[in-house]
Structures are given as C-alpha cells and as structure tokens.
Image (cartoon, rainbow, N blue to C red):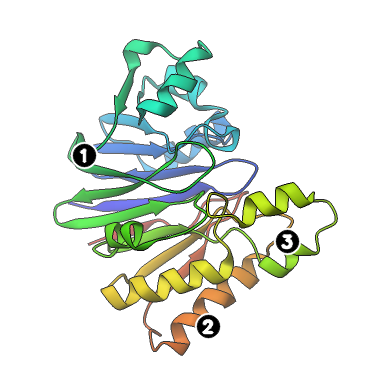
Amino acid sequence: MSFRICSIASGSTGNCIYISTDSTTIIVDEGAPVTRVERCLTLLGRGKELALLITHGHSDHISNAPQFARRNKAVVYCHYKTAETLLKKGEYDPKNVIEFSEGDFTVGDVIVTPFKVGHDVPCVGYVFSHKGKQIGVVTDVGHLGGSVLSRLKTCNLVLIESNHDVDMLRVNKNYSPWLKSRILSDSGHLSNGACAEACVKLAAAGVKQFILAHLSQENNYPELALDTTLGALYEAGYEDVGVEVARADKMSSLFEIT
C-alpha cells in the first residue's frame, strides 16, 4: 500500500497539498485555482474517498475551498473554531462540514492527528498515519516549540514552513513596521533559520525528507531557503536527509513513503 504526498501550490498566492493512499485522497487547504487542482488530481490519481482538510481560515488557504468541495463532492474537515468563521459566510453546506477539536480521527484508511500551532488565527498542523508510516504538515506557525516538534518526530516526511529570511524582511520597504512585527512574532511565520533549526532536531529523531513550504515572494528565495536548511543539516552531519522546496506555480515531486 503506497502513501504519497505532493505540494500542488505553496506560497502567499495560494496553498494546496495532496496526500493519498490507494483508496483515499486528502487535500490539505485549497487556495489554488480549482481547475489547476483538478488537473493535478487527474495526473496524481484520486482515491474513492476524497476529503478536504483545512488548517486555518486565511484566504490563501481557503479561497477556493467551497467551490472545490462542491464540484468534487469532498467532505470538509476543520477545527471547530475555524468552522465558526467558515459557516458564517454561507459558502459551505453545514451537512458537509465535519468539525473536530482534539484527538485523532479517520479519513478512509488514514489516521489524522491534528495539533494546534501558534498563528494569529486558530490554526492546526496535521500528522497523517497509514500502515505504520507518517507524514507531517505544519505551516503558518510563528514558533515551533517542543510540543509541536514532538508531534513531528515520528514522521517519515515533514512539510514545514520556511517563510522568510529575517534580514530581507527587516529591510523590505513595502512592509509596514506592524506587518514585520506580526510576521516575526511567535504567532506569525517561521523564518528560514528557525525552519533549519527545527529540521536538524527532526533529523536527529529520524525524519529523512523535508519539503520547505509557504515561501514569501518578497522576503525569500527558493535557493536561499534550501541553502539555509541544507547547510544546517550538513553541518550537523545529516547529509543523507532530502530537502525540496515547494513552489507557488508548480507541483513538487510526488513523494512515496514506503
């Protein structure tokens, strides 16, 4: 039984992640154009059961979620605090929205473990488990404390935010002091350096593959994010750990966890 992940889109313009087994397909967030996501599903494959899981209510993660859910008859799962916000807009059929709080739940043959992360709206990360293999997803998080890292240490692959270079952000004249402060806070976004530090800790626990996600278009470069994490891993002696950068405009590699 195969267990797969692919980033369909990742960045401030829209986010969407594909996770699948032979019988179940899970889309995490849908902020990318629906037709693009549907084309990717045709290419990547779709299981008999299709679900849409939401991390939080920011537009780059949910802007196209209602349309995608309707067109593809996908059940929507989200934290109950996020559901309060979504259902007020009237874009979702309440009968098609499943709310969760704490604890595991099952989607098809995948066990889903949600966990709270520090962001400026209610937000969760996920660990997906299937046949003894695990995939972790955590973006839009200002700080990765020990409780979050402990959730990810048993994963085979982790998709993790590497949003910005701190120096680039600080000198960016297009960003207000308030916005810079928000991004740099513990409820903002994870920097390249903080991501690299977390990857070293997770590699020490046995994680073998990382996907760097949610890169800022103005305050980061894919090459810079990659070099920062690879450099930290190599310096710590983890030269056998794989790292790839997820892009906004194209799919990542399709990773199969065996």
From the viewer's perspective, is 133 left or right of 72?
A: left
Q: Residues within 10 Å of mark 2 (few under 14, many from 20)?
A: some
Say which element carries label 1: loop
Name which of mark 2 and mark 3 comes first in the sequence.
3
**What residue type is disc 3 on?**
Leu
Examine the image and state in which quarter residue 148 appears.
bottom left
State the image coordinates of residue 238 (x, y, percent, origin top left).
38, 84
Mark sitting on residue 169: 3
As drawn, which residue projects farthest toward the left?
131
The spot of residue 208 in percent (x, y) is 33, 72
Q: Which residue is drawn at the image coordinates 64% and 71% (left, top)? A: 223
- Give residue 170's quadrant in the image: bottom right
Please state which of residues 56 and 239 is positioned toward the viewer in this rendering: 56
The residues bearing labels 2 and 1 have C-alpha atoms spaced at a distance of: 36 Å
Q: Which residue is mark 1?
A: 103
Q: Residues within 10 Å of mark 1 (few under 14, many from 20)?
A: few
Earlier residue among tags 3 and 1 = 1
Dot 1 amino acid type: Gly
Residue 231: numbered disc = 2
Kindly tell me whether residue 113 is visible in this rendering. yes
Residue 253 in view (yes/no): no
Looking at the rendered image, the quarter that the C terminus falls into is: bottom left
